[in-house]
Image (cartoon, rainbow, N blue to C red):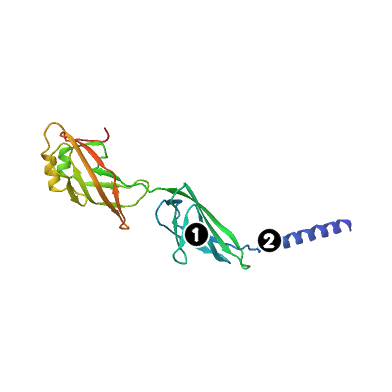
Amino acid sequence: MRISAALLFIFSLVICANALAQQDTFRVKTAKVVTVLPGHDIVYLNEDNTITIRYKGRHALGKVQFLGGTIDKKTDSTYILKATSGVEGVLTVYEKLANGSQRIALNKKYRLFTRPLPEVLLDGVKCDSVVDKFTVIASGRLQLRSKHSNEKFVVTSFNLVIPGEKIDTLAAEGNQMSQDMKIAVDNMPKGRGGMLIFRDIKCRNTKGEEKTLPVFRVYLSEVPRTKAGM
């Protein structure tokens, strides 16, 4: 009888444990998902940085704050982040509870950067490098290469100065050297090289925003070669 009683007690414990396990199995917690697009963590200083915030949960999306700058709501899910200084910002998204209070649903850190200007190249040659005169006369095309981003820029106009030559500043539209520029390069004294200075270089990105790039210089060689760096 004692053994049967013990077995009955153990059996009862197993039944209780199974019941508790079933309760835990069916206990569902409220799920919330906050998505911020684009997913990168960079905000460019002195620019409008557009983000999209999507909230999914049993409550409503609450207030949205950006510590380190300002945030403006444009549509139900679109916001503009803007910062003028600093190195870091924090985006905080709240959810609004049924009782009217709000609690944090997401914190996202952003690094604050000044967007770098694109790098200027002349027929693939960097600033302060040597390029052969023949390449310049045959092609003479300014190219732009974005640093740390996939942003696209195109040259819309520029001026050329040839130090020591008695010519006015020459202007060109687009990214191609004009015929007058190439003639001026070809007429430079033979055997002594020279320098070309490109200034007032205007460019435009895909948004139509125009920027002026720093002065760009190259040194000429009459030997058909291209050398990066001096």
Task: Pick the quarter of the image with the N terminus.
Answer: bottom right
**Regarding mark 1 in the picture, which secondary structure is present there?**
strand
The residue under the point 10% across, 39% down is 187
Where is residue 20? Give x, y as percent. 72, 61
Q: Quadrant of the C terminus?
A: top left
> What residue does disc 2 label?
24
Pick whichever, 125 or 32, lies toward us.
125
| Distance of label 2 from label 1 (alpha carbons) | 29 Å
Q: Is residue 200 left or right of residue 110?
A: left
- Please tell me which residue lies in front, 210 or 206: 210
Determine the image quadrant of residue 57: bottom right
Front position in the image: 104 or 35: 104
Residue 221 circle label: none
- Sequence-first tag of 2 and 1: 2
Q: Please indicate whether residue 26 sits to the left or right of residue 9 in the image.
A: left
Residue 148 x/y as whole percent: 37, 46
Secondary structure, mark 2, is: helix
Whole-percent x and y of residue 140? 18, 45
User: Type of residue at label 2?
Assistant: Asp
Name the residue type under label 1: Thr
Residue 136 position (above or below residue 203): above
Q: Which residue is mark 1?
A: 35
